[in-house]
Amino acid sequence: MTTNITMRDMIAAGVHFGHQTRYWHPKMNQYIFGIKHKIHIINLEKTLPLYMDALNFLSSVAAKRGKILFVGTKPAAQKILREEAMRCGMPYICHRWLGGLLTNYKTVRQSIKHMKELENIRDSEDFNKMTKKEALVLTRELDKLKLSLEGIKDMAGLPDAIFVVDVGLERNAVTEANKLKIPVVGIVDTNRNPRGIDYLVPANDDSSSAIRFYAQHIADAIIDARSSLPMEAIIAEKEVRRAGKKPMGNKPKGRVVAKRHDEKEEAPVAALPKVEVVEEKTVVVAETKSDSKGKKTAPSRAKKVESTSV
């Protein structure tokens, strides 16, 4: 990745402006530089390296032909994320996060299929043969589906990572991604809880200029990563996946789960004593039968009993 970003660029975009001091979250205290006019100022010396780590991670995902879902439903982010996601060929959610979009993707996929069927009907000659009321009902249903599903109709499966603007507003998206262990890159302002974010970027999430700054550089990094990947590597990766093996490469950084204090380590299992066979004998036991008069008859069968001494 050849993106060169400086703190001066971040200041020009307004990345350093946080929220009013009365709305701050204690977990964001380490990223606050100071206060000016009752507004928290974010420490860009910490924001810049964290943002570069997020860019490098998203670039590595894109280099492996992974899908990155852009999520931002607030008015200041809708148009910007839609434009940048379409520019780099990534899926996006900009209108409303549907509950279960990730955890219940099978049902969402059926809705996407239904939306595509309605689009085919609208573009066919049968649409002109419909009555005015039927055409209106179909158009309204299609427009409603497109508001929520237009950005993910070509996603073809769960994303490999998600990029979220305003993690507080998009808490449902973060929660579903955490359940499925999908890495989350999040823009976290001073009034938000950074819980559940794998790649945290402490920065302004309200200004349209700041949001455009994040989205443009992420889209540029994705485009550069895809263009720099040679075709031989793509073909080799497809062959490896077709063979049922995992492709070589660095795994995306995940969330580290600390060991609970109440968990006890299991004691090692003691080795079993070695058993040696010293002697093996075969004993034939004859079974006899008695007739009704009490006389013994010839043995009818024999049992083979193996005795082993240790």
Image: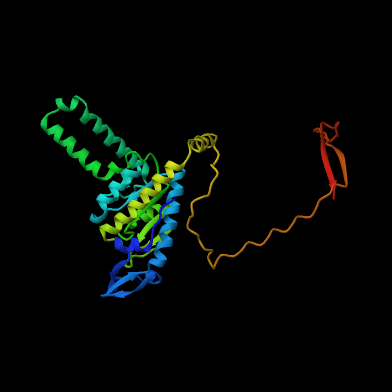
Q: Position of residue 118 (x, y in %)?
A: 24, 33
Q: Which sits in the foreground, 44 or 273?
A: 44
Residue farthest along the left direction in this orientation: 132
Q: Is residue 94 left or right of residue 252?
A: left
Q: Is residue 251 left or right of residue 203?
A: right
Q: How is the image coloured?
A: rainbow
**Would you say residue 181 is visible in this rendering?**
no
Q: Position of residue 164 (x, y in %)?
A: 34, 55
User: Going 22% across and 29% down the picture, which residue do you hit?
Assistant: 123
User: Going 20% across and 31% down the picture, which residue do you hit?
Assistant: 122
Q: Which sits in the foreground, 309 or 297?
A: 309
Compared with residue 246, is residue 175 higher up or lower down, i.e. above or below?
below
Q: Position of residue 176 (x, y in %)?
A: 38, 52
User: Going 23% across and 55% down the picture, which residue do you hit?
Assistant: 75
Q: Which sits in the foreground, 51 or 152?
A: 51
Q: Which sits in the foreground, 97 or 39?
A: 39
Q: Is residue 293 left or right of residue 160?
A: right
